Every structure is written in structure tokens, then in C-alpha cells.
Image (cartoon, coloured by chain):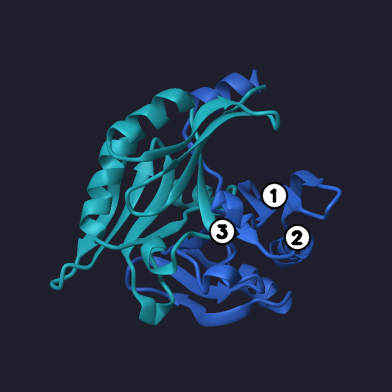
Chain colours: A cyan, B blue
Amino acid sequence: MEEVIENDGPFIMVPTLSVRNGISAIEFYKKAFGAIELMSNISTDGQAVAELSINGARFVVADEAPEYDNYSPETLGGTAVRMGLQVANPDQVAEQAISAGAKEIYAVADQHYGYRLGRILDPFGHHWEIFRPLH
Amino acid sequence: MEEVIENDGPFIMVPTLSVRNGISAIEFYKKAFGAIELMSNISTDGQAVAELSINGARFVVADEAPEYDNYSPETLGGTAVRMGLQVANPDQVAEQAISAGAKEIYAVADQHYGYRLGRILDPFGHHWEIFRPLH
């Protein structure tokens, strides 16, 4: 059974990104990264949560809820976790995200620490490092 | 070759956590989660960066560097990304982390949205949701 294999297999990181305007953020991540929705829920007051997958890399996007210590980068004035996304072709992935509205912080290039990597800022204040190992 | 398989395979999330006192944080994550070091570097001025793996779930821990927009939760007064960690036995993983110094925000329990999940706050201000799917 797949369930048993999954539970006995490697552990998996599934970060949750707090944002303002969750509905727009979900649409952005679909356009920017080709993310697909594994689950989503929008409450009657418009608060959204969705689990997304970017070619198998899972993450969750949810409207911020400061009463539960879930703050957006806009509320905090920054973020304490950068989203590293290991992909097959970082140049192509970063370019698509920038076309969708992300801002380039630095271009994808070969880095001395062994990755081809670039950094972008998405419209919701989250930072992404798009990379692949060089060797 | 493993390298080719990796690059052609699924994408992978590898978040980077900014912290104060990176050297202590790396030791904490080893003790709390049984993380192993895949790479680490400590500069002459004591700034640390390490790539860690918790049973295959990779992440990076690095000293904050506000000049590069890398802020710790302590500097920001919170965090905009919660670290979801899918494991085989969330009760056991959360208990070990709490024994190592994390604070329980809520206990691991069956949640209506389909996960057995609890939330903890680590000594460096990062939030972790430790979970497994219920079905």
C-alpha cells in the first residue's frame, strides 16, 4: 500500500507560506511555477488554504492569521525562511516566475558552493532560491 | 548516474532557515530531530551555514544577514513560513524535539483536515508542524 510506503519512507519537508490575499497567491504560484493543487479550501470569509505541488515539491499557501502566530512577510517586513527549490532547469523556472511577476534579486548563475542558483522575490514577499546541483 | 536521475526527477523543497547563533542552532537540530550534516561551513568570524537532513528531508540553517534580506525570527518578531515535516511517527519526533528544548504550541493529535499533527516552536523562533497523513 502506498500509504505504508510513504509513512515508512524518507521524511518530507512541506513548508507553509503565510500570505496576504491567499487566493491571489495560489493563482500566482500556479502561473509562476506550474504548481498544481493537491487540496484547497476557501472559507466563507474568503480565507484560503491550499496544498500545492511543483513537480512533486509540496508546499502549503495560507492566508496569514496573526492570532495563531502566522504572519505574512508584508506584516513582518521580511521573512526568516527562504524557499529553496531544487529543479532540473533553474534558468527556465526562474524566468517563468519572473514573467509571472516575481522580481529578480540575483540572476541564476554557477555559484562557488556547488549549485547553479538564482534568487527571486515573489509578489507576496517570499524569497525563492531556484537551483540545481552543479555536479 | 545518480546525478542525472536527481536532476530529471521530482523537484525538491530545501528551505533555508535564518537564525541567530547558527552554531547552536545546528547542534539543536541534530539533537531535536536527529539531523545529520550534509555540508557545513563556519567562517573565520563565526558565521555558520549547514545543510542538514532529517531522514532525507533536507534544509539549510544559516546565520542571519540582514544586508541580504536574511532575517531571523528574533529580528522580525515572528516567521512567515512554518516548517512542515512529514514523518513516520509525529508523536515521537515532537517529543524528542521538546526534550531537546522546543516548546509545544499544541500537542500532536488527529486533525480534521486529514493529518495527525502537532506544532512546536524551536529555541531559534522557527515553527514546526510535525505530521503524518491519517489515511
Circle 1 chain:
B
Can you give x and y, in whole percent of width and height, for residue A52 in the image?
34, 48
Kind of residue indicated by mark 1: Leu
Can you give x and y, in whole percent of width and height, for residue B27 in the image?
78, 62
- For this orientation, the residue located farthest to the front is B67
**Considering only order in the chain, which callout, 2 or 3, is on the residue closer to the N terminus?**
2
Image height of B16 relative to B11, above or below:
below
Specify few, some or many for label 2: CA neighbours under 10 Å numbering under 14, 14-19, or 20 or more: some
Q: Is residue A97 left or right of residue A46?
A: right
Q: Assess whether mark 1 and mark 2 are in contact (beta carbons under 8 angstroms).
A: yes
- Using the image as rendered, state which of residue B109 and residue A39 is in the foreground: A39
Q: Identify the disc placed on residue B30.
A: 2
Q: Are marks 1 and 3 on the same chain?
A: yes
Q: Which residue is mark 1?
A: B52
Image height of B111 relative to B86, above or below:
below
Circle 3 chain:
B
**3 or 2: mark nearer the eye:** 2
- For this orientation, the residue located farthest to the left is A44
